[in-house]
Amino acid sequence: MIKSIITALAFTAALAGTAAADDAPAAEAAKVKLVYEHELPNVPGKSIRGVMVEYGPGLSTEPHTHPSSAFIYATVLEGSIRIQINDGPVKVYRAGENFTEMPGDRHMVSANASETEPVKFLAVFVVDTDQRDLTFPIKD
């Protein structure tokens, strides 16, 4: 339980620290909550972590990456989100749609596509069990 709380706090701090809302404090830009964490019994050294993420209207995060061991499968639960992975096109995903990030991908755009409604998505990470930080800002 303590391990899960520490992981959630580390992820929240990393993601909130990269918030890109011009007039909103970083803590208001993204709501992030670790909702589950389990070691995979048939894949030694790997865990699955579910992270619920919500951006308020018009909010986004700065470009970032995730651990090199992480595969991410995300499902949009409410609203719509603009996503760009690496140098690919910017795409909009709506409630019920999914996107993935492969190990080593750069998440160049992650923004609420609406100026009036929040977006909520569940990001499911398959990652090395000993990996504590889940988000890293891209340094220029």
Image (spheres, rainbow, N blue to C red):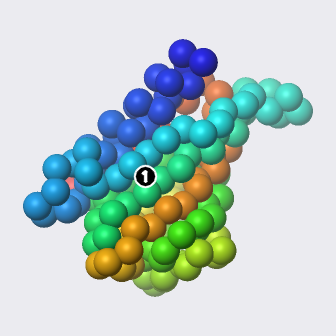
Amino acid tagged 1: Thr
Quadrant where the N terminus sits is: top right
Residue 13: image location, x then y, percent: 33, 36
Residue 122: image location, x then y, percent: 59, 56
- In the picture as drawn, the residue positioned furthest to the right comes out as 42
Please indicate whether residue 72 sits to the left or right of residue 104 in the image: right
Query: Which element type, helix, strand or loop, lies under badge 1?
Result: strand
Q: Is residue 100 in view from this perspective?
A: no
Please indicate whether residue 127 sits to the left or right of residue 90 in the image: right
How many numbered marks appear?
1
Residue 38: image location, x then y, percent: 72, 31
Q: Residue visible at 49% across and 28% down?
A: 7
Which residue lies under the disc numbered 1? 65
Q: Residue visible at 48% across and 76% down?
A: 80
Quadrant where the C terminus sits is: bottom left
- Circle 1 packing at 10 Å, graded few (<14), some (14-19), many (20+), is many
As rendered, which of 95 and 104 lies closer to the eye?
95
* Vertical position of residue 21 compared to residue 125: above or below: below
Q: Residue visible at 40% across and 31% down?
A: 10
